[in-house]
Image: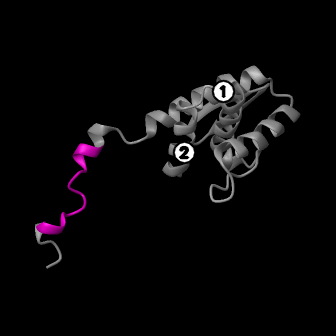
Amino acid sequence: MKNITLGKKSFEVQKPDSLASVFEFVIAWSTSDNSITNARLCAGAIGLYLDSLAILPKYKPMKETPTGYGYKCLERLLSLKVQGSEVFEVGTSLLTDMAQNLPRSEEIEEKKDFFPSPDSGAGS
């Protein structure tokens, strides 16, 4: 569990369950040099972490993009009087947390034999 503060309220939040969603947000964030896109991604990250509290809209990855979802979250956060600087600060910390939770090359090396190769005779 992680704690975040937005406005005058603190929330205990959870890491997103979906690694695919985390991956999409981190890739979009790491390749963006646009402040508007980054604001949306920060707001979307907040939405993902607040998901269990149902304060912001739910992310529907098959129907929307991370930036489209982030726009909806940003709209809601601003209407709740959360300052833009807070969205950037909290969202950046959450996106950083997401990036740290993605599988790393060392972990991939440890699991590289998870799937048997076709010539290993597995299943014969």
Q: Decide: is 113 above or below 47.
A: below
Asked which secondary structure carries label 2, the reply is: helix
Q: Is residue 118 magenta?
A: yes
Q: Is residue 15 magenta?
A: no
Q: Position of residue 124 (x, y in %)?
A: 13, 79
Q: Residues within 10 Å of mark 2 (few under 14, many from 20)?
A: some
Residue sitting nearer the eye, 32 or 39: 32
- In the rendered image, which residue does mark 2 sit on? 24
Task: Check disc 2 and give the amino acid type.
Answer: Glu
Q: Is residue 57 left or right of residue 110?
A: right
Q: Quadrant of residue 24?
A: top right
Colour setup of the view: one colour
Residue plotted at (65% across, 35% down):
41
Task: Check disc 1 and give the amino acid type.
Answer: Asn
Q: Earlier in the sequence, mark 2 or mark 1?
A: 2
Q: Position of residue 20 (x, y in %)?
A: 51, 51
Residues rendered magenta in the picture:
108-119
Q: Position of residue 55 (x, y in %)?
A: 77, 45
Q: Is residue 111 left or right of residue 46?
A: left
Q: Quadrant of residue 61?
A: bottom right
Residue sitting nearer the eye, 110 or 3: 110
Residue that protrudes farthest toward the bottom in the picture: 124
Residue plotted at (43% across, 41% down):
102
Asked which secondary structure carries label 1, the reply is: loop
Please identify the quadrant where the N terminus is shown: top right
- In the rendered image, which residue does mark 1 sit on? 34
Q: Position of residue 44 (x, y in %)?
A: 68, 40
Residue sitting nearer the eye, 57 or 41: 41
Task: Find out whether the residues at labels 2 and 1 contact each other: C-beta distance under 8 Å.
Answer: no
